[in-house]
Amino acid sequence: MHIDWLAGCATNGYDTVTVQLPTELCRGMATDSIKQLQALYPPGQTKFNIGQPVPQTDVFGTALVMAIRENGYAVKEFSPKQPAGSSGGLNLRYTVDKPETSLFEGLYRVRLSVGKSVLTRAYTASNKTANPAGAWAFME
């Protein structure tokens, strides 16, 4: 079975949240994402450079950046004037999207690009709660 995913937000040139989601769902996916980051990148020893703007209206991005800080990571927020990777650390970008087809209603995907690696996980939504629909996929 083939699922066509949205590629990201083409309007601003950056990965972003491409669908409107309930706050609780975004926070749940961000919390799960930070757990995976902790398993791969040690807090207190890792600096993440956020590689895209995170507007206050981006609930997932705001929750993710806050969780990264709260869990002991150094964070450098996005600056369009400074090239990616110019301050050391790992570049971190994210996308939250859903399949283009209505056959998979309630299915969402989180994609984290960390340096040259990509982490991806699908979620189902029920009662505004994010439920993992499979394991994290890790690609280098």
Image: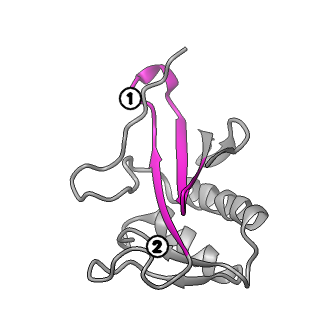
Q: Look at the image and say whether residue 115 sits in the magenta stretch.
A: yes
Query: Is residue 92 placed above or below 44 in the rendered structure?
Result: above
Q: Amino acid at mark 2?
A: Ile
Q: Which residues are magenta?
A: 90-119
Q: Amino acid at mark 1?
A: Glu
Q: Quadrant of the N terminus?
A: top right
Q: Residue at x 42, y 81 (%)?
A: 86
Q: Residue at x 32, y 82 (%)?
A: 82
- Looking at the rendered structure, the number of numbered marks drawn on it comes to 2
Q: Which residue is mark 1?
A: 100
Residue 114 place in picture, x, y as percent: 56, 61
Q: Is residue 110 left or right of residue 36?
A: left
Q: Quadrant of residue 83?
A: bottom left
User: Reading the chain from its start, which is encountered first: label 2 or label 1?
Assistant: 2
**Outermost left residue:** 11
Q: Are marks 2 and 1 in contact (CB under 8 Å)?
A: no
- Along the viewing direction, whichever of 83 and 7 lies nearer the viewer: 83
Residue 11 place in picture, x, y as percent: 21, 53
- Label 2: how many residues lie within 10 Å, few (<14), some (14-19) or many (20+)? many
Dominant SS of magenta comes to strand
Residue 138 place in picture, x, y as percent: 66, 46
- Along the viewing direction, whichever of 119 and 121 lies nearer the viewer: 119
Q: Residue at x 62, y 41 (%)?
A: 123
Gap between marks 2 and 1, in whole Å? 27 Å
Q: Residue at x 43, y 33 (%)?
A: 5
Q: Which residue is mark 2?
A: 50
SS class of the residue under badge 1? loop
- Label 1: how many residues lie within 10 Å, few (<14), some (14-19) or many (20+)? few
Number of the front mark, 2 or 1: 2
- Along the viewing direction, whichever of 50 and 69 lies nearer the viewer: 50
Residue 50 place in picture, x, y as percent: 46, 73
Q: Look at the image and say whether residue 34 sits in the magenta stretch.
A: no
